[in-house]
Amino acid sequence: MRNYSFTIRLIAALALIPICVPMQTIAEVSDQDFANLKAMVEQLNTEVQTLKTTHEEDQDTIHKLQQKVGRTEETAVDAKQEAAAATAAATAAAQATPAPSNATHDFMVVGDAEVQFGQMIHPKTNATFALADFAPIFLFRTSDNVMFEAGFDFTLSNNEPNGGGYTTTANLSFATLDYMYNDYLTVKLGNLLLPLGTYSERSAGWLNKFPDNPLSRDVLPGNGVGIELQGGIPVGHSGQYASYQLFGVNGPGSVDGSAHASQLDLNSNVGFSSDGTQTNLHSHPAGGGRLAWFFPWKPHYDAELGISGEFGPWDDAETSLWYGAVVDASVHVSPYFEVKGEYMNTWVQTSDMGTIQPRGWWIQAGYKLAGLNLDVPFVSNLELVARYDTINDGLLQNQGTRTDRETAGFVYYITNTLWFEGDYEWLHSAGPNALPSQAYIFQMSYGF
Amino acid sequence: MPSPHHYNAWKFWLSRSGGAALLAAFLYAITYPSLYAGGDGKTEQKPAATSANTTTAQKLTGEDLYAINCNRCHAERYPREWTPSQWKTLMMHMRVRANLPADQAREILKYMQEQSGN
C-alpha cells in the first residue's frame, strides 16, 4: 500500500511537471522583457487605433462616393429624359416643318411705302396728308446668277383745277436683268439706277432719313436705259473692297430737240418716242461710271469714298454735250453716328447760254441716342438728324435760282422697318424759281 | 448761231475710241479669271490652308461681314425675317445694289440662312 501510494504520488508529481514548469517559466519573465512586451502591445494598440481611424475615414469616403453616385445616376436619368423629350420635339418639328427649299426659282416683293403730313409756312399753305409713295420692288430669281428686278413708284395727285378727282401715277423707277457672269463681273441691262454718287441706289425712299431728297440731286439724272457692268473686288481679309461700275445709256435729252438751256431733260430718252418709234433722240449714247473704295476698320466703323461721272450729247442734233461729276463719301463711327454727303457739278453746253454749270452738294449727319445708354423710355429709339444742301441751277445771274437749305429732324424707330420721321426746313432761295422759306414734314416710312 | 463752246466732232470720236479701248482692256482683265478657268464663269477652288498662320484663319465670318455691311444704308434686318430661299434672292439683290464682292455676299448669305426663319 505504501509503495502504491508512493507510486501514485510520483506519477502525480511527474504529471504536474509539464504544468508547473511553464508557470514557473512565466513567473520567471524579467522586467525588461515585460517592458518590451508592453511596448510592443502599446505599439500594436496604436496601429490598431490608426487602422480604426483610417477605416472610419474610408467608410466616410465610401459614403460620400455613394451619395455622388446617387446624384450622378439621378442626373443621368434626368439627361435621358431631357434627351428623349428633345428628340421627340425635334422629330415633331421635323415633321411639322418642310425641308428648306432647293428650288432654283424664287419670286419676292420687297419695297417701301411712305405717308406724309406737312405744311409750307412761308408762303403758308394748308397742312395736308399725302400718300408720298408706294414703291414695291419685284425680285425674280431664276438661277444662282440670274435675276430680274423692277421697282415702281405709285403716287397720287389731284387732277387739274376744276377737273375733280385724282390721278394715280405709276412710274417704273428701275427694271434690270442682272447676270452675274463671275465673282467680279455682273452685267445689268434695262432701266438702270445710275451710279452717280450713291443716293439713287442706296439712299432714296425708305432708306433716306429725311422725308425729301437733297435739292442738289436735281442736277443729275436718276436713271437711264442701257447697260451696266459692275463688280466688287475684295482687298485683303478685313472687309475692304474696291468697286467699279461702268455704264452706257441713251443719255439726257432735249424737250424740243434744241440745245437751249431751258430744254435740258435729264430723265427722258428711254428709247421709245410717244408715237411708238423706237429711237434714241440723238445718235450716240452717253457713258459713265463710278469707282469706289470701302474701308471698314471694324464693324460699324467704316468709310467709303467714290467718284463718278457721265458724259454724252443731249440735244437731237448732237451739237452739245452734257457732263456730270460726283464725289461721294460716307463715314460711320460706332453703330450710332454717321455722316455722308455728295458734291456734284455738271457742265451743259447750250446754244443760248454757253456752258452752264448746274451744281450743288449736300451733307447730312445722324446720331442715335441709344449711344448715350440712357435708361429712358423711347429715347433709345430716337435718332437726331441734320442736313445742309444747296443747289445752283447755273443759269445766268438774272435767270438763275440758287437755294440753300438747313434741315433738322428726327427718326423714331418703332421697329427696324417702321420709322416715324419729322423735320423742319429753313430755305434761303433767290431767283425766278425760288422755293418757300420754311416748311415742316412728318412721315411714316415702312420698309417691307 | 452755234456757241463757241460747241465741241469738235473729232474730239468727240477720239474720246469715244479711247474710252472703248479702255473698256475693252478692262473687260479683258475682269473676265480673264473665268476664261483661264475654262470660261464657265466659276471660281477655282482654293486649296485648304496648311498653316494656322495663313490669312484664311483671319478671314471674317458671315456674321462679321453682316455687321460691317448691312447697316450702312438701312437698319439691320433680322435673319429670321425671311426663309433661306428668300435670303438667297435678297442677297442677290443686295450684292448688285450695294456692289458687294461675291465672296462676302456668299458668307453673309450663309450666315443669314443658318439663322433664318422657316
Image (tube, coloured by chain):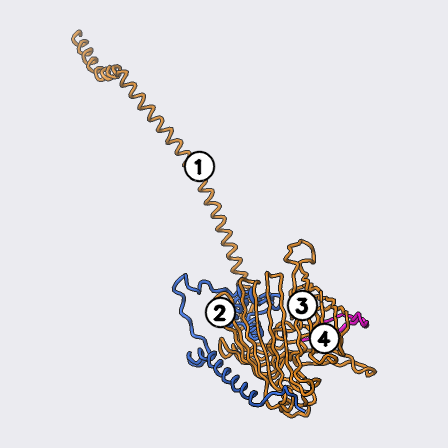
Q: Which labelled disc corresponds to residue A235?
A: 2
Shown in orange, the chain is A
For label 1, the residue is A60
Q: Going from the N terminus, do you reach mark 1 or mark 4 first?
A: 1
Q: Secondary structure at mark 4?
A: strand
Q: Secondary structure at mark 1?
A: helix
Instruction: Tell which of A11 and A410 is nearer to you.
Output: A410
Colour of the chain lettered B: blue
Q: Chain of mark 1?
A: A
Q: Chain of mark 3?
A: A
Work out which quarter of the rendered image holds the C terminus of chain B and state it.
bottom right
Residues at marks 3 and 1, common chain? yes
Given the image, on which type of amino acid does mark 3 rest? Lys
Q: Going from the N terminus, do you reach mark 2 or mark 4 first?
A: 2
Distance between the Cα atoms at labels 3 and 2? 30 Å
The image shows residue B101, relative to residue A58, as above or below, that is below
Give the side of residue A61 with respect to residue A135, left or right.
left
Q: Decide if residue A94 is in sight here.
A: no
Which class describes the residues within 10 Å of circle 3: few (<14), some (14-19), or many (20+)?
many
Write down the quadrant of residue A178 in the picture.
Answer: bottom right
